[in-house]
Amino acid sequence: MFGVADKILNRVRGHGRGVRVYTPKDFLDLGSRASVDQALSRLCKAGTLRRVDRGLYDWPRHSTVLDQPAPASVDAVVDAVKRRANVQVVPGNLAAANALGLTHAVPTRPEFLASRHLGDVTIGNRTVTFNAAGAVLSPWLATPAAVIVQALVWLHDNASDRLADAIPTLRKQASDDAKRSLAKGLNRLPGWAIPAARSIVENRAPLAA
């Protein structure tokens, strides 16, 4: 009969090397929390799995360039944190503004916003930061419109004088799903964002300041 460690390893191998980052929560159907923790500890001590950070594990792929195990994928770490904490997570506002063509700047380190504050995660020499989304963005995290709201917040905080000029770009770059989602919840936006958001979803020029 397979023990908990064997069952964990079979599941991990089913996904392949370097594909997924795991938490103990992912294996609680295989045994008690104590037995899962013990099995993960044994697998890490044996060098079969790797402890990425506290409560995060992976089966690393080998990097031929580095000639050592490759760092864990940031996306896989974020997915694991989301599952563990049962929260919504999106890339930071600067990433959203970049994705919608408002800036060429990119984050200097991985930054994410979550529906509540989460601790940072260290991957090798990189730190993945999870900040609380805040009252303005939190209602939108699970919707396609989150990226537009994030871009509006970024403009408000960093380039408020460009807000009106940015509306045509947001209208062009945002998906139809995002704009429909935004249209359904305009009243959830702060007052300063409503005119701009309405201009985006109604495909018209913003009102003059």
Image (cartoon, rainbow, N blue to C red):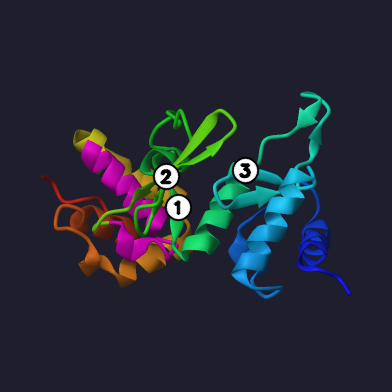
Q: CA distance from mark 3 to mark 1?
A: 21 Å
Instruction: Give the residue at mark 1.
Output: 90
Tell me, yes or no, whether the two marked residues, 2 and 3, touch with CB atoms within 8 Å: no
Question: Is label 2 in a helix, a strand or a loop?
Answer: helix
Q: Residues within 10 Å of mark 1 (few under 14, many from 20)?
A: many
Give, as a three-letter code, the residue at label 1. Val
Tell me, yes or no, whether the two marked residues, 3 and 1, touch with CB atoms within 8 Å: no
Question: Is label 1 in a helix, a strand or a loop?
Answer: strand
Circle number at residue 96: 2
- Displayed quadrant of residue 137: bottom left
Instruction: Give the residue at mark 3.
Output: 52
Q: Residue furthest top?
A: 66
Tell me, yes or no, whether the two marked residues, 1 and 2, touch with CB atoms within 8 Å: yes
Q: Position of residue 209 (x, y in %)?
A: 10, 45
- Residue 165's place in the image compared with 17, above or below, is above
Q: Residues within 10 Å of mark 2 (few under 14, many from 20)?
A: many
- Mark 1 or mark 2: whose residue is earlier in sequence: 1
